[in-house]
Image (cartoon, rainbow, N blue to C red):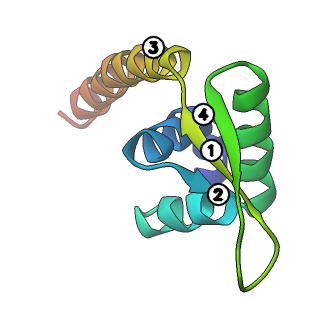
Amino acid sequence: MDSTQLLKGVLDLAVLAVVDDEDGYGYDVVRRLRAAGLDEVGDASVYGTLRRLYAAGALTSYVVPSESGPHRKYYGITPAGRDQLKTQRDDWAHFSTTVTDLLQGATA
């Protein structure tokens, strides 16, 4: 199965969950997603998702100076983002349970 197609459908949810855990800059979010097991996630996809979620009001951003390179733009979750995360978590729980039940029934 092509997991990149599955990832497209849940990338917003995954990014919101990572940023809800701790604010992060673009590559930090990519690194944490990969460390969590989403090895196929692309840098450009995550950066685009961060920009889109920011534009939608789900994320806030701030710049942190860096002594060893360019300043980093950090993202944090907003109250609207937390509401979106809760809704998407509930939707995911329902969807994944439904698909699991369907697959288990198909093997019985």
- Tell me residue 102's x, y (percent): 31, 24
User: In this orientation, does residue 41 appear?
Assistant: yes
- Tell me residue 71's x, y (percent): 78, 66
Q: Quarter-wise, where is residue 68 in the image?
A: bottom right
User: Against 65, is 4 above or below?
Assistant: above
Question: Which residue does the numbered mark 1 point to in the structure image?
Answer: 75
Which of the two labelled residues, at mark 4 and mark 3, occupies the earlier sequence position? 4
**Horizontal arrangement in the rendering, residue 86 relative to residue 19 (left or right):** left
At label 1, the amino acid type is Tyr
Foreground label between 3 and 1: 1
Question: Which residue does the numbered mark 4 point to in the structure image?
Answer: 12
User: In this orientation, does residue 10 appear?
Assistant: no
At label 4, the amino acid type is Asp
Gap in angstroms between the C-alphas marked 1 and 2: 6 Å
Gap in angstroms between the C-alphas marked 4 and 3: 13 Å
Question: Which residue does the numbered mark 3 point to in the structure image?
Answer: 83
Q: Secondary structure at mark 1?
A: strand
Who is closer to the viewer here, 58 or 95?
58
Gap in angstroms between the C-alphas marked 4 and 2: 16 Å
Which of the two labelled residues, at mark 1 and mark 2, occupies the earlier sequence position? 2
- Which residue of the protein is positioned furthest toward the left in this rendering? 108
- Tell me residue 35's x, y (percent): 44, 69
Mark 1 Cα-neighbour bin, 10 Å: few <14, some 14–19, many ≥20: many
Point 80% across, 43% down: residue: 48
Foreground label between 4 and 3: 3
Who is closer to the viewer here, 67 or 46?
67
Q: Quarter-wise, where is residue 90 in the image?
A: top left
Question: Which residue does the numbered mark 2 point to in the structure image?
Answer: 25
Which of the two labelled residues, at mark 1 and mark 4, occupies the earlier sequence position? 4
